[in-house]
Each structure stands twice: as structure tokens, then as C-alpha cells.
Amino acid sequence: MTARRGSLRRRVAVLVAGSVAVAVVLVAVLTWLVVSSQVRASLDTALDREATRVQRLVRVDADWTGEGSEECRYAAEPACVRLVETADEVGSGTGPLQTTEAALAVASGNQPRARWTAGPVRVVAVPTRPGEAALVGVPTRQADLALARTAVALTATGGVGVVLAGLLGWAAATVGLRPVRRLDEAVRRVRDSADPHDHVDLASTSRDDELGRLAVAVDSMLVELAAADDAQRAFVADASHELRTPLTTLRTNVQLLTADRPLRPGTRAALSAALGEELAAMTRTVDDLVELAGDDRPRAAELVLEDVVAAARAAAAATSRRAPGVQVLTDLPDAPAEVRVPAGRLGRLLDVVLDNAVKYGAGGAVELRVVSGPPGDGVVVTVSDRGVGIPADERDRVFDRFHRAPAARGLPGSGLGLAIAAQVVARAGGTIAAEGRADGEPGTTIRVVLRAG
């Protein structure tokens, strides 16, 4: 982990340093080209000025030959001058002002002007009199010296810039990856301690950029992991507590049945019946626990279309068979009403809600109603009983696992039924709520809203 983090820092540092170094080198090269062009242009401007002066001298003084000014001894003006004629041979003369073919072309009028560099002298040939041209030269020593100094300065500046680019790249990588390092440390702490409650310090990573959003995402993930861990621990604790009572009862009954002391036939039959009932109740509780252990988040890929009207009729008939002494009143539309629910779970949802109404309805009638609203509004299923009702401050908690309202704690049950119903509704992306009866009479109404197909 450390080696990979260091490697990433090196790569970022090299990338930043390389980018800055390339920029520095490009600026240095462009500066050199601009300065060199300007220096050369200034030299040619000075040379043209001297050539114009010589042309005027020749035109004013017909006897002027420029003799004695062939030696280019001065770094700047006055320039060195030599007159050539068309009869001169190529290569005649001494020093940098030797006759060239370009000079003869200017003297003969075939070319208006010619310019070249002869060693340390910049030369220009301009026409003067018919058949004659003047070679005017200016030494390039000052220009070459200025360019050399500029090259040294640019090289030194570029070298310093490359070194600073390396330092800047390393600093940028270190500072820029600091939030990533904190995230890495936080994740490794969670891995080593197996404790998702150890969150990322968002105060030190409060950035409105990709790294800041990554820190928030990781911290949110840890919060969800911590919540899931707490829920799992609470679920295990509640399940163990819920199973402890029937296990104690089973142990007592088994000990009585297997004791050496003889039991009366009636007593043995009662214990055997109680043992069977406890085993059946424990089996239902274990099945409910397994069902509740699943994920309750909605998943569109698992949803199918089912007719809630047909499912409501089947659930009402099944409830009447399980509780023949309780009347189930139905108010169902004639047309089918399709809803999106997890496959095979709609019947389970209705059975759980109806069984809850029968159990806590004090033997009164249970009312099942399905209302299909306009498209997009969903389908509303309500189940009402005529029991003691649920206090307003308990209505939200009745869907928690193992929670039972105070008025219902003396009745049989594990407190898992409505939790299962809430889980099925959550997977379907609907809503479920406990309310008082609409007519104001004692009792409870469970309202379920499912998405229409």
C-alpha cells in the first residue's frame, strides 16, 4: 500500500515537473528566437543606414573611392566600405569585403541589393554609380556577444526553472494527494480494526473538487457500513432475546416429558401439544428471521407486475380459513390493478397485514380495501381492524423488528410481521404507514401504497 502510494506521488510529481519544465524550455527557446531575430534585425537596420550614407557620399563626391575604409575596425558605425566594379574578379580584395558574384550582380544592375555574412562581418552590396557597387560591412561582434550572453542567461534561467519545476511538482503531489493519503489511512484503519465507525475527518478534507467529493463518498460509505453493522448487531441481539423464551419453554417441557417421574396421560398429552405449538412458533420465528435478514433496498430488476385485486381476494380467503371466527370484509374494484412488487411477495405482504389485524383486532371484523388511483398515483391497499388501536407515538415504531406496542405485549407473537411487510414494501419502492381508523372508532388502519404497473 505504501509503495503504491509513493509510486503515485512520484508519477504525479514527474508529470507536474515535466509539464512545467517543458513550458520553461519552450519559453526559453521562444525567447532566444525572438531576441536573436531582433538583434539580427537591428544589425541589418544599422547596416542599411550606413549603406544609405555611403550611397549619398558617392553621389555627392564623384571622386570618392572609399580608400582606407576597407578595414572593419569599429564594432559599430562608421562602417567599412569598398567599391567594386563589374570588371573586378570574384574573390578580389582582402578581408571580409571580397568581391562576390552577388556584388557583381548588384554592380551590373541585375540585382537591387545583396546581403550576406562574411566571418565576423555583416555585408550588404548596394548600387552607387553605373557599373559600380559599394560593399558596406558592419562587424557582428557586439551582436554575437549579446546573443551569447542571452543564451547563457536563458540556459541558467531554464536550469533553475527545471529545478524549481521538480520541487514544485513534488510539493504539488504531496499536498494534492494528502486527502488521498487520509482516505487510505482511514480505510486501512477500518480494515485493521474492523470498525466502520472510524470515519474520515471531513474537516481536513473540505474541498469542493473530485478529492473532496471522494472523501465525502468514502465517509458516507463508512457511515452506511456502520449503520449496517449496528443493525446486524441489534438484529442478532433481538433475535437471540426473542428465541430465548421459547427455547426455555421447550427445555422445560422436554425435561418434564423425559423425567423419571411418571406423568398422567392428560398431562403428558398437554405437554406434547404445548411442545408442538412451541416448535411450530419457533419455526415461524426462524423463518421470519431468515426473511428479514435480506436486503430491503428497492431493486428495479427484481420487480414484476402482479394483480393486487386477485392477490387481495386470495389473501382474504386464506385469512378466513385460518381464523374462521373473524369476518373479513372486502371492498375491491372489479378491474385488475397491477402493481410492481418483488416476485412472489405480494401475497406474503397481504397475509402478514391481515394476520396482524386478526391478531390485534379483538375478534372484530377486518376490512380489506383496494383503491386504484389515476396512472402514476399508485394503488392504495388499506387493512383496518377494530382493536384497541396503536398510540400515535408508537405508530412509526411498529414496523421495527421485534417491537410491540405496550397494549399488544400480552398477546402471542414475535413482533416481526409488520417488519416483514415494511421490508416487502421497501423493496417494491412503496410506502407503508399505521393510522387510526378513518371513522374515528377504536382500531388501526395499515395503509400500503404500491407503484402501479
Image (cartoon, helix red, strand yellow):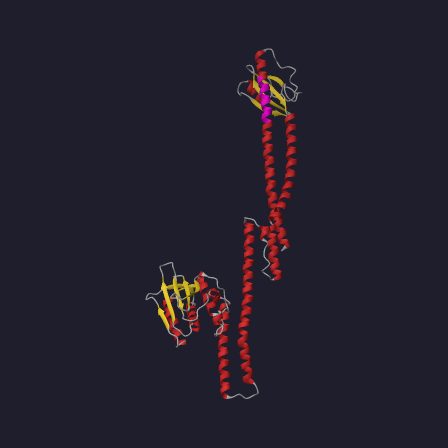
Q: Residue sitting at 62 percent across and 61 percent down?
A: 193
Does the segment drawn in magenta span residue 42? Answer: yes
**Quick check: 120 left or right of 331?**
right
Task: Give 42 or 174, whichever is nearer the viewer.
Answer: 174
Q: Does residue 235 lie above or below 56 as drawn? A: below
Expressed as whole percent of the image width and height from the top left, the position of residue 309 reads 36, 67
Q: The N terminus appears in which quarter of the rendering?
A: bottom right
Instruction: Tell me the magenta residue range.
Output: 40-52
Is 324 or 117 nearer to us in this picture? 324
Residue 251 shows in the view:
yes
| Foreground of the two, 408 or 223 | 408
Residue 176 is situated, as x and y percent measured from the top left of the image, at 60, 48
Q: Quadrant of the C terminus?
A: bottom left
Q: Quadrant of residue 428?
A: bottom left
**In x, y percent, where is residue 312?**
38, 69
Residue 355 or 210: which is nearer the viewer? 355
Looking at this rendering, what residue extends furthest in the left direction? 334
| Residue depicted at x 54% and y 75% | 245
Up-down relation of residue 185 to residue 139 (above or below): below
Using the rendered view, name the quadrant where residue 133 is placed.
top right
Q: State the predominant SS element of the stretch in magenta.
A: helix
- Residue 448 in picture, x, y percent from top left: 41, 64
> Could you tell me how many numbered marks the image carries?
0
Residue 235 is covered by the magenta coloring = no
Q: Is residue 53 above or below residue 395?
A: above
Q: Decide if residue 85 is in sight here.
A: no
